[in-house]
Image (tube, helix red, strand yellow):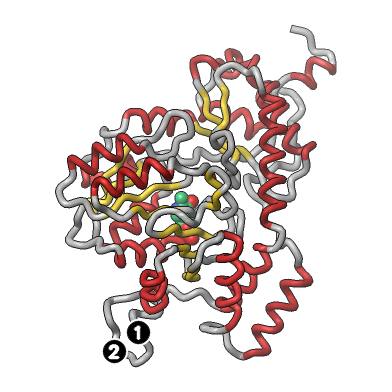
């Protein structure tokens, strides 16, 4: 093995080459889209003296409803509380089963638990790791008095919404979407936010639309929207004679101001993220054992995450080993979602840890690499180049 400069440049950093990002590249970088406009909006809120239950939340709800092409949007304190209140409204109680993917963020299951249900985990689809409708149907059929079906638009990839609705209808349960990643996604041209009983978005800082903390419930159901406005305010209809045990799940005016700011220019940012993913795919095309979590042809993903799916035998490295090699390059990564929820300690008592072999394998295979809305094409190409440079050295990296 020679040690001339060219060779050193081509070596992965883990084997002594020059790191692709000597200063480091974080998974996400949150930058307020239009700072001047935001400061002005915040000034207006402060001047009004009303920091909650004011006009800004209503404005955010209207702007979101217009973008999502849905009649009702109710702002809440975060996606988790939004899901809890929707599931409560859907009649989840008595620890009845709520069928949901194992491959999702823990909050999907936590919401069902807090609403009074019991998670029953179902498999993911091999192609895109969203909920497998057929496996969900089987688990609904096997469940005793199932109360609801939940599905997650993982990474912003639209679920099989048509088939999932058929499955939910056949089982006689409401379909609730954890759409935390999906603000700006489209299924066959139709915005995510219009499907099922309700869809709940997250506006926390790792998502594509950010309010600092926050959630939005989108629904076509006027009764649900009305109930949620009461539910987020302790269940108080206005006379302090509460109708049911609600929550304080209000969004503050300050958060709504941040969220409104983030909505402006969203379609352009989503298109830009798609273009970056295309760049990444072009550079890494042909690498053995590597594919990306992509939406179906004709669908739009927010690409909340740019996630690689590795076949470790063909690629030569596991996702964990690739993460180590990328760390040496200065590139941050995460195994979203590992461990899958059915394997997490919080749900060990349910005895479902061994119930999802395909989800287990997929969760072992995924690795999310940095992507953010202001990233330039050169940066995403450099991340992709690093993966391309690492792969031929897989054997030496395994030995290192
Ligand atoms: C972030 C996230 C949530 C939780 O959102 P919060 O707004 O933090 O409550 C729920 N589900 C998924 C899939 C998420 O990624």
174, above or below 397, in the image:
below
- Identify the residue shown where x is 40% and y is 80%: 233
Pinpoint residue 45: horizontal percent, then vertical percent: 65, 83
Q: What residue do we see at 40% from left, 75% from top? A: 226
| Image-based side of 154 in relation to 109, left or right | right
* Residue 212 visible at all: no
Q: Quadrant of residue 160?
A: top left
**Alpha carbon of mark 1 to alpha carbon of mark 2: how far?**
6 Å
**Position of 18 relative to 153 (above/below):** above
Screen quadrant of the C terminus = top right
Left or right of residue 250, residue 374 in this image:
right
Check disc 1 and report the residue beneath it: 236
Q: Residue at x 49, y 41 (%)?
A: 336
Q: Nearer the viewer, residue 257 or 24?
A: 257
User: Residue, x 58% and y 71% (percent of image)?
Assistant: 62
The residue that label 2 is drawn on is 241
Would you say the residues marked 1 and 2 are in contact, meaning their CB atoms lie under 8 Å apart? yes
Please name whichever residue, 379 or 169, is drawn nearer the observer in this view of the structure. 169
Where is residue 314? Give x, y as percent: 53, 15
* Circle 2 residues within 10 Å: few <14, some 14–19, many ≥20: few
Q: Which quarter of the picture shows residue 287?
A: top right
Numbered disc total: 2
């Amino acid at each position: 093995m020679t040690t001339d400069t060219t060779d050193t440049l081509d070596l992965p950093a883990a084997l002594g080459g020059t790191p692709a990002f000597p200063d480091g590249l974080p998974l996400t970088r949150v930058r307020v889209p239009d700072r001047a406009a935001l400061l002005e909006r915040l000034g207006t809120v402060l001047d009004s003296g009303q920091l909650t239950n004011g006009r800004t939340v209503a404005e955010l709800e209207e702007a979101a409803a217009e973008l999502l092409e849905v009649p009702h949007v109710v702002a809440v304190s975060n996606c988790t509380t939004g899901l809890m209140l929707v599931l409560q409204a859907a009649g989840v109680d008595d620890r009845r089963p709520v069928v949901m993917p194992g491959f999702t963020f823990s909050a999907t299951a936590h919401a069902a638990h807090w609403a009074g249900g019991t998670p029953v985990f179902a498999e993911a689809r091999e192609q895109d790791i969203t909920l497998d409708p057929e496996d969900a149907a089987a688990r609904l059929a096997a469940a005793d008095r199932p109360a609801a079906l939940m599905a997650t638009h993982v990474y912003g990839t639209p679920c099989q919404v048509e088939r999932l609705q058929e499955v939910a209808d056949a089982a006689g349960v409401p379909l609730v979407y954890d759409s935390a990643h999906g603000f700006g996604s489209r299924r066959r041209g139709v915005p995510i936010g219009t499907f099922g009983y309700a869809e709940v978005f997250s506006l926390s800082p790792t998502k594509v639309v950010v309010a600092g903390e926050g959630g939005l419930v989108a629904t076509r159901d006027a009764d649900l929207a009305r109930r949620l406005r009461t539910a987020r305010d302790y269940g108080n209809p206005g006379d302090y004679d509460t109708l049911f045990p609600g929550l304080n799940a209000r969004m503050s005016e300050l958060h709504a101001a941040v969220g409104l700011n983030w909505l402006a220019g969203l379609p352009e940012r989503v298109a830009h993220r798609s273009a970056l993913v295309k760049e990444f795919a072009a550079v890494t095309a042909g690498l053995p054992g590597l594919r990306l979590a992509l939406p179906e042809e004709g669908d739009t993903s927010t690409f909340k995450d740019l996630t690689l799916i590795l076949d470790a035998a063909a690629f030569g490295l596991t996702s964990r080993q690739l993460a180590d090699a990328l760390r040496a390059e200065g590139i941050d990564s995460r195994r979203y979602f590992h461990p899958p929820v059915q394997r997490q300690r919080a749900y060990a008592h349910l005895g479902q840890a061994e119930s999802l072999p395909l989800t287990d394998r997929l969760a072992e295979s995924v690795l999310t690499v940095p992507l953010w809305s202001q990233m330039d094409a050169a940066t995403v190409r450099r991340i992709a180049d690093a993966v391309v440079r690492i792969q031929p050295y897989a054997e030496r990296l395994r030995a290192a």
